[in-house]
Amino acid sequence: MATLTVLPSAVSPREDAIQLYKAFKGFGSDDAAVIGILAHRDATQRAYIQQEYKTMYSEDILKRLSSELSGKLETAVLLWMPDPAQRDAKILIDALSPNFIDLEAVTEVICSRTSLQLQTLKQIYHSTCGTYLEHDIELQASGDHQKILLACVNKPRYEGPKVDREMAAKDAKALYKAGEKKLGTDEKVFVKIFSERSNAHLIAINTCYRDMYGGSLKKVIKKETSGLFERALLTILQCAENPAKYFAKVLYKSMQGLGTNDTTLIRVIVTRTEIDMQYIKAEYHKKYNKSLNDAVHSETSGHYRTFLLSLLGPNH
C-alpha cells in the first residue's frame, strides 16, 4: 500500500505547471509551494506536469528544479520526479559512476526488483548512458557479489505463485551440501538458486530447509558468506519473504549512529512511497517501537524534512 496522498479532485497538470513557474519566479524559489504540489502527485501526474511545463515555458522542469532547489531537498525531489523504472536506472547510473561507487545501493535495487523490472531498467540504463549495465557491474563489482548481480540481471525469473515442492526440497538439499555440510562453501550453488528461483519458491526452500535441517536459510547465509555477497543473498531472501520488513530495517540503519545516511533514507522513501510504504511504516513501528515519521522528523530538518514527511503521509 502506498502512502502518497493525492488530492481527490487533482488540479490539471497545466495548472500545476503554472503554479510551479510562479514558485520559481523572483529571488529564490518558494520551496513550500513546490513541495505542496509535487509531493502530492503520482508518477503519471508528474509526467504530465513535465510535459506541460516544457510545452508552456520551453524549459525542462528538472533543470529548473535543479537550479532552484539545493542540498538534500534537491536530491530528493529530483529522484522523486521520474517514473519507477527511470528512477531505478538513475540510481544505478549514479551508484556505478567511477567517482561515486555505492555498491550497497546497486545491491538493493538489483536484488529487490522483479525480473521484468530489471529487464526494463537495463534498456533505460543503456539508452541513457550508452553502456550496458552488465559491463558496469563487471567493472565495479567483484567476486561472488559480481556473479550474483550479473545472474539477477541476466536470467529471466518466473514470478508467479506456483511452487514445485519436490524441486524446493531438492534445492534445500543442494544448499545444505554446498554450505553447512561441507568444509568451505560452494558459492556457485547459492548464486544459481537465489538468482533463478521465484519468491514463492525461495520461501518454500526456506520451509523445506527448516524441516530437513532445523535451521533457516538466513542463518546459513550469515554463517557461510560475507560482505556484499551475503548482503545480496539476504536482500533476495528477505524481499521474497517480507519486503516491508526488509526496507524498515534499511531505513532504521540509515538513521542509526553518528549522522544520517541521507542517500539511503531518500532512496528508500522515494522508491517505496508509491508501492508499500504503508506496510513499511507498520513493520517499522512493530520492530522499533517508534513511528517512522517520528524517526525521520528527528533526523531531518527544514523543507527536506517537510518533503519526506509529505511522502510518508499521516503519522499513524
Image (cartoon, grey):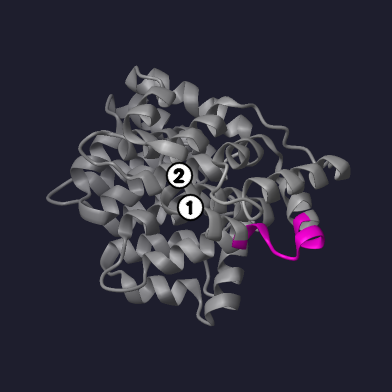
The boundaries of the magenta stretch are 209-219
Image side of residue 136 versus residue 214, left or right: left
Magenta-drawn stretch contains 215: yes
Q: Given the image, on which type of amino acid does mark 1 rest?
A: Arg
Mark 2 highlights which residue? 107
Residue closest to the eye, 272 or 177? 177
Q: Position of residue 168 (x, y in %)?
A: 80, 45
Dot in front, 1 or 2: 1
Residue closest to the eye, 309 or 99? 99
Point 75% across, 50% down: residue: 205
Point 49% across, 33% down: residue: 147
Specify the label residue 170 is tagged with.
none
Q: Position of residue 96 (x, y in %)?
A: 32, 35
How packed mark 2 is, by other alpha carbons closer than 10 Å (few <14, some 14-19, many 20 or more), is: many
Q: Position of residue 87 (x, y in %)?
A: 43, 38
Quadrant assignment for the N terminus: bottom right
| Residue farthest to the left, as pictured | 27
Image side of residue 70 versus residue 230, left or right: left
Residue 107 is at least partly visible in this image: yes
Sequence-wise, the earlier of marks 1 and 2 is: 2
Mark 1 highlights which residue? 231
**Do labels 1 and 2 touch, CB within 8 Å?**
yes
